[in-house]
Image: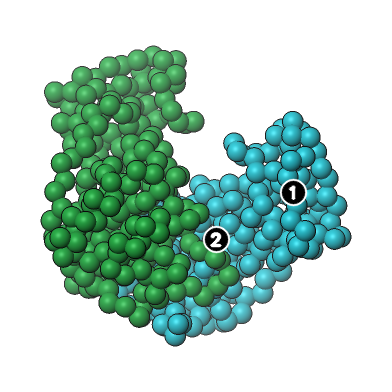
Chain colours: A cyan, B green
Amino acid sequence: MYLLEGPHLVQEAAFSARHLLSAVLIDEAFRLPEDWPLDDVEVYQVTHKIFTELSQTETPQGIIAVCRMVQPAVTVHQGRYLLIDGVQDPGNLGTLIRTADAFGLDAVFLGEGCVDGYNGKTLRSAQGSHFHLPVVHRNLFTVVAAMKQQGIPIYGSSLQGQNMKKTDGDKNDYALIVGNEGNGAQPELLAETDIQIRIPMAGRAESMNVAVAAGILLYWLSADELAHQA
Amino acid sequence: MYLLEGPHLVQEAAFSARHLLSAVLIDEAFRLPEDWPLDDVEVYQVTHKIFTELSQTETPQGIIAVCRMVQPAVTVHQGRYLLIDGVQDPGNLGTLIRTADAFGLDAVFLGEGCVDGYNGKTLRSAQGSHFHLPVVHRNLFTVVAAMKQQGIPIYGSSLQGQNMKKTDGDKNDYALIVGNEGNGAQPELLAETDIQIRIPMAGRAESMNVAVAAGILLYWLSADELAHQA
């Protein structure tokens, strides 16, 4: 089980994954919107004092849900995936999950060295994307092996990689590996990729934030699909 | 004056902006690298107890610098700029500054509603980029007016904007405006832009993190320049 805080996240869960909601706790002053589909969910109203004790945030927003943690049984098939190796900052991890959702990816896999995908700060940074696509802790070497069997091209983000603009993007199916904030993905994992790529940079920063880099790489890998949009 | 924490940031300041360093404080256990150009900077060694009291971080790294806050006298000329309106999260602001640096922008302007550009968390997220390009608090309407006089095209990031892929990117000179995490840039400021653009999205996320969005937009605006790199 894990806690989900704030009206936006609880609303996302109520509409997208109600079966995961075990209970909802509201501050005595909080008005629950009538159109939220919570008929079969237990709702507890508690005093402001108790609510403030329970909240993990500095500015509690009046509503907390208790969610069942279900690791979805994801089978690797043709599709688009983000693999995250050793990211330590919960905010970065949540932003990565949100970005994967924005590009319509099929799943996000978190390697063994990653911070908890259901950490409170990760959930808040992901803004409800956990309810839009599977977020799964899994051994990344196993995941990569399964993807290779399916013929899915594996891209690794690396400062030592090729300039991505000199390589082929616009794939229908792909997996992108990004790694730890300081060290990137582990070399053994990068060795399993088909190609290592980097974002060309023009300034004096040595590198980019991992979530910003993933956003640019996913945009580039998805460019063909996105071009057809209005 | 402001405090700069950790060896990476102090090293960046020592090599890129030594004139800003007023003093350096080190923990009794910290070994100052001999090749840092700190000859004319006062260095104080303090006990571990005092150092821990002074540190603003949970895991102090043994070195803090006291820096002079100098708002650079930036004159708007032909170039590339990021204008940040009302961003509230210090981590997001730092990541935006780091991203602007990675794309070689000429300056970052922070509007009146922005969090402090020299907040400790902003400095840490920016990873030293403050010493690579000017970061200036300024009225954004005044900045935009000056840029228009120079004929610099002004782009505004907006979820209601045009799909950027249907518009002209690849400018030699530009200004990009990004805004508040929840509400975007203020409408009055967006009304002053030449064009409002959005990133095409394929998934179910309603929007992206502001720093990720800025990264993709700056990549797109800079694509022509970046194509010439090795």
Direction from residue A196 to residue A64 in the image, left or right:
right
User: Which disc, if any, is residue A51?
Assistant: none
Question: Which residue is rendered at x = 40% and y = 48% of the image?
Answer: B86
Q: Given contact means CB atoms under 8 Å apart, are the residues at marks 2 and 1 in contact?
A: no
**Figure check: A228 above or below B108:** below
User: Which disc, if any, is residue A31?
Assistant: 1
Say whether disc 2 or disc 1 marks the residue closer to the N-terminus.
1
Question: Which residue is rendered at x = 40% and y = 59% of the image?
Answer: B187
- Which image quadrant is residue A110 in? bottom right
Residue position marked by numbered label 2 in the rendering: A97
> Are labels 2 and 1 assigned to the same chain?
yes
**Figure check: B208 above or below B13:** below
Q: Amino acid at mark 1?
A: Arg
Nearer-the-camera pick, B25 or A151? B25
- Residue B183: give x, y in percent of width and height: 48, 56
Decide: few, some or many residues near mark 2? Use Cα within 10 Å; few <14, some 14-19, many ≥20. Answer: many
Direction from residue A79 to residue B122 in the image, left or right:
left
- Residue A107: give x, y in percent of width and height: 59, 69
Question: Which residue is rendered at x = 65% and y = 44% of the image?
Answer: A61
Direction from residue A71 to residue B129 in the image, left or right:
left
Instruction: Tell me how far mark 2 sits from mark 1, CA to CA.
Output: 30 Å
**Figure check: B70 above or below A44:** above
Q: Tell me, yes or no, if residue B25 can be seen here.
A: yes
- Residue B138: give x, y in percent of width and height: 26, 44
- Residue A198: give x, y in percent of width and height: 33, 65
- Element under disc 2: helix
Q: Tell me, yes or no, if residue A145 can be seen here.
A: no
Nearer-the-camera pick, A205 or A127? A127
Q: Quadrant of the C terminus of chain B?
A: bottom left
- Which image quadrant is residue B189 in? bottom left
